[in-house]
């Protein structure tokens, strides 16, 4: 049975979707962008600051579901500019120390014209 996960410590969904779904022992978290939950505003003007806010949002969802960054088995990262790859990785590697499987692609446009978005899949064995 799938269970919807929601926390006020991460931004509310800006469309018809859930922050995350827990299906058995697997958590599927929707893509997070750098919205500061209390203000609803985009946090940061550069990739490093935006990536940090994305990671905080992911952390809040993981915590709400009873998971940690160490439980993440797959990430999908979207960048507005692949030129930000190195700076994004510098933030990313501080959070995902277990080195989950990952895809990272550049896309034409992200919601609210942010610089990055990250979605995760986590598993409790």
Image: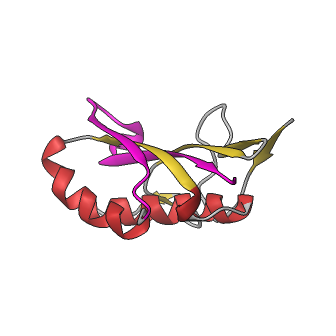
Can you say whether 111 is above or below 99 in the image? Answer: above
Extreme residue toward the left, this view: 83
- Colour scheme of the picture: secondary structure
Answer left or right for 40 relative to 7.
Answer: left
Can you say whether 22 is above or below 88 in the image? Answer: above
At horizontal 68% and vertical 40% (from top left) the residue drawn is 18
Extreme residue toward the right, this view: 1
Residue 96 in which image quadrant: bottom left
Answer whether residue 49 is visible to the viewer in this image: no
At horizontal 20% and vertical 50% (from top left) the residue drawn is 85
Q: Which contiguous range is marked in magenta? A: 98-125
Query: Nearest the camera: 41 or 99?
Result: 99
Extreme residue toward the bottom, this view: 94
At horizontal 61% and vertical 34% (from top left) the residue drawn is 15
- Is residue 107 rendered magenta in the image? yes
Instruction: Measuring from the top left, give residue 65's x and y in whole percent.
Output: 73, 58
Residue 70 in which image quadrant: bottom right
Extreme residue toward the front, this view: 125
Instruction: Measuring from the top left, give residue 33's x and y in whole percent.
Output: 45, 50
Answer left or right for 41 relative to 12.
Answer: left
Query: Nearest the camera: 7 or 70?
Result: 70
Instruction: Measuring from the top left, give residue 49's x and y in whole percent.
Output: 31, 66
Instruction: Measuring from the top left, give residue 52's x and y in whole percent.
Output: 38, 66
Query: Nearest the camera: 52 or 63?
Result: 63
Which quarter of the figure is the N terminus placed in?
Answer: top right
At horizontal 36% and vertical 70% (from top left) the residue drawn is 94
Residue 10 in which image quadrant: bottom right
Answer whether residue 69 is visible to the viewer in this image: yes
């Amino acid at each position: 049975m799938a269970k919807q996960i929601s926390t006020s410590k991460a931004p509310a969904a800006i469309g018809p979707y859930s922050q995350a779904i827990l299906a058995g022992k697997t958590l599927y978290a929707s893509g997070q962008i750098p919205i500061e939950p209390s203000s609803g505003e985009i946090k940061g003007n550069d990739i490093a600051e935006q990536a940090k806010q994305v990671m905080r949002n992911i952390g809040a969802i993981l915590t709400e579901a009873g998971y940690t960054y160490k439980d993440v088995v797959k990430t999908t990262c979207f960048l507005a500019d692949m030129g930000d790859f190195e700076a994004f990785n510098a933030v990313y590697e501080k959070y995902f120390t277990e080195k989950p499987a990952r895809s990272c692609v550049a896309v034409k446009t992200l919601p609210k014209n942010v610089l990055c978005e990250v979605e995760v899949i986590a598993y409790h064995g």
